[in-house]
Image (cartoon, helix red, strand yellow):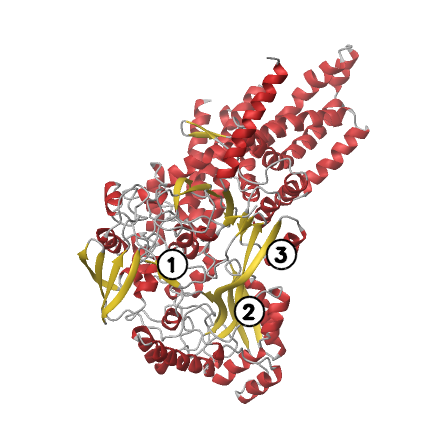
Amino acid sequence: MFSFLVKRLLQSIVVLIAVALIAFSLFKFVGDPINNMVGQDTTLDEREALRERLGLNDPFPIQFYHFITDAAVGDFGISYRHKIPVSDLIAERAPATLELSIISALLAVFIGIPMGVYTAIHRSGFISRSFMTLSLVGISLPTFLIGILFIFLFGVILRWLPTFGRGEVVAIGWWTTGLLTWSGIKSLILPSITLALFQMTLIMRLVRTEMLEVLCTDYIKFARARGLKENAVNFGHALKNTLIPVITIIGLQLGLVMAFAIITETVFQWPGMGMLFIQSIEEVDVPVMAAYLMMISLIFVGINLLVDILYAYVDPRLTIDGGSKHG
Amino acid sequence: MSIMKKILTTSAIASIILGASAASANTLRFAFQGDAQSLDPHGLNETFTLGFLSNVYEGLTMLDQDLKVIPGLATSWEVTSPTSIVFKLRPGVKFHNGNSFNADDVIFTWKRTLSEGSDQKVRGAMVKNIVKLDDLTIEVQTQGPQPLMPSEWAWIFIMDKEWSEANGAGNAANVKEENANGYTLNHANGTGPFEIVSRQPDVKTVFKRSANHWNTIDSNITDIIFTPVKQAATRTAALISGELDMVYPIPVQDWKRLDSESGVSAIRGPEARTIFLGMDQFRDELLYSNIKGKNPLKDLRVRKAMAHALNLDLIKKKIMRGASTPTGLMIAPQVNGFNADYNTPYKYDPALSKQLLTEAGYPDGFEITIDCPNNRYVNDEKICQAAASMMAKVGIKMKVLAQPKSKYFGKVLAQNNYDTSMYLLGWTPGSMDVHNVLLGLLSCQNKESKAGLFNLGNFCNQRVDELQKMVGVETDPAKRQAYIDEAMQIIKDQVAYLPLHQQPLSWGVSDKFSVNQRADNAFDFRYVSKTQ
């Protein structure tokens, strides 16, 4: 187990450096940051001086070296646009994104799995069929369209829920939460459902397919033959054995939930990290873009590691020592 | 007392309290597509940031709702010699923290505009020295004659010396020095009619009416909540649902929708921003064309052919929903120096275009690429596409390269050696004076004299250069206008640019509020009121 962890950590570092390199070389194509930092009357000399000061005239390897060595000690520099350290900026925005993603993930898991089980057991019922049809919509409509549809239906026509923002938030130390105020909770409903919808339908369909397969296996037949109760068979025997692929997907999707949050956050003007990232792209705020990408890849790497460990826990047959192939 | 009675009494008290606060508090909630870059008044010379801050800070002079220069923190000024102006400062003005405004604050502010993080160095550098004559009188010694200094300085917001120094903000906030002088990014202390109550960048800024402002303003607004909302659809939805009272900009295609809703309307008016096409007139061979060995755009006949191929009325009707103002000049009517006699656009005459192209030796036209932003001006990309199809009718095959503004400006501006053959650009002179346009867009490129910085195609005419210099120092209005008119005539005859139109301003406003739409698109709280 220990050697596995060390090996995985080393791999993770290589992945992170690769991401940094690719991301950093792409920033060249985003545009010129200087024009967003000065007004139209600023002279050429001043623009050039600013460029020099920011180190944008240095050759690529030197810029990259500075970035990597600073990033290794957690220093991502100062945002071009906000002029404050990037780490402060991300810490300020992280609660909004985390709250949104976690609520969405919970929605996706705790609605998606029961729906999947239900549709697998009652294959041809009316409710199952409508779930399946709805899930098609969820999986095929793009997030921003669903978000805008929700805004117009619940925000503009029915006027039940706010159309944008996070509502009133309460600060607990450095963390801000919208879960403690009525307006905060109301603001969370539309974005979290928008964000959860895709994952929810994915999980539901996955669980359904796996369940259908498992329900046909011999040991389920035996369980039934032993006269076990239907619920014990479905949940105790069948569902448990479908969870391996489901956990993998949920783990990977958790990362995606945060990545998808970019679009949801933009549509709902949700003041999280995704919104920050989009604005940074527009303004060519390189330090923020770099830090965000590094953070997201760190999260992905971490989740993957966690999923591997969870495997061993759920299915003892899988040994992770000795590099056996799995997954 | 029964429970029912209790509830009734409580709700009665509650309604009295609510009623009372509703009568005294008028809150305006508004949104723009982005946020002010920071609260530092010298951090970025850009319309939205400065317009936003003009409600909190004030300059020696100010712009009124028609963009005319009026006294601000100076009550009057007098040109005492060609290079010196004496300003009488307004007595009894207090900053929001209670400090008094005086000559030292002006001198401090001027020095601050020259500090490294400042983006107001150009305006600061108009001044060579400021001499304090007494607490409320200063003599500004300018760098050569600078008759435009008082109007340019409407955008130099005066800061409190004591407050700034006490908070380590003696210099403008600087991107490289970590938080050394970052206090002003999120804190402000001006003399304006509104104070900042709280600010979270990109999320929310709350203003309240200042109790000790020196001037009586028309507005009855007491509190203002600003939230940036990036997506146009979300902004529109929030306005219609009543969560916001005023949002801008509204996409022109949403006007019909707003007009059909009750309780809100789309307010549109002419912006002082002129949209135009520019042409490379200095390279011997175009970078992006199929003509090799020569530059067709150097030929006046070709430029004329292009001018007569553009149907500005059609662009207005089909792309701008009737809301643009076709123009023949590079400046809008609001800009000082505008003369309507010169504002007739080139006539739309494709037959003439073809004839001119044939005379110039391009009977079958030629190919050229036009650079175009796609998120900077109103319908910018669509304008380029329309222009391309109009050019196609006379044989010029124009390819449109439309990119986001960061990419676009990174390509076409000076730091990338003006890497373009043709481009679409929009311009509002910050000073609202024609000299800014003559210097930045119409003078020959010159690094030493800092002229022609945005003259991307380097239209270069010696007489226009001379006239620009004369306009910059001439104080007699009649003579000055004569110089301007002469320059405009040359520019027109030489087809220096292809002016298209002034784009529309587009605000969405709740019917409960009245606003004044200023032509530079700055939102001045002084002219907003709650009407119902």
Q: Residues within 10 Å of mark 3 (few under 14, many from 20)?
A: some
A13 relative to A193 in the view: left or right: left
CA gap between label 1 and label 2 equals: 25 Å
CA gap between label 2 and label 3 equals: 17 Å
- Residue A178: percent from left, percent from top: 51, 30
Does the CB distance between marks 2 and 3 fall below 8 Å? no
Q: Which mark is residue A39?
A: 1
Q: Which residue is mark 3?
A: B255
Amino acid residing under circle 1? Gly
- Residue B467 position (above or below residue B49): below
- Residue B83 position (above or below residue A118): below
Q: Secondary structure at mark 1?
A: loop
Amino acid residing under circle 2? Thr
- Residue B531: percent from left, percent from top: 55, 48
Q: Which quadrant of the rendered structure holds the C terminus of chain B? A: top right
Is B88 or A160 nearer to us in this picture?
B88
- Residue B24 position (above or below residue B405): above
Is B26 or A245 nearer to us in this picture?
B26
Q: Chain of mark 1?
A: A
- Residue B214 position (above or below residue B268): above
Q: Chain of mark 2?
A: B
Q: Which residue is mark 2?
A: B325
Q: Which residue is depicted at the point 39% across and 62% down?
A: A40
Q: Secondary structure at mark 3?
A: helix
Q: Residues within 10 Å of mark 2 (few under 14, many from 20)?
A: many
- Residue A300: percent from left, percent from top: 50, 35
Question: Mark 1 or mark 2: which is in front?
Answer: 2
Q: Which residue is depicted at the point 65% across and 31% down?
A: A203
Q: Chain of mark 3?
A: B
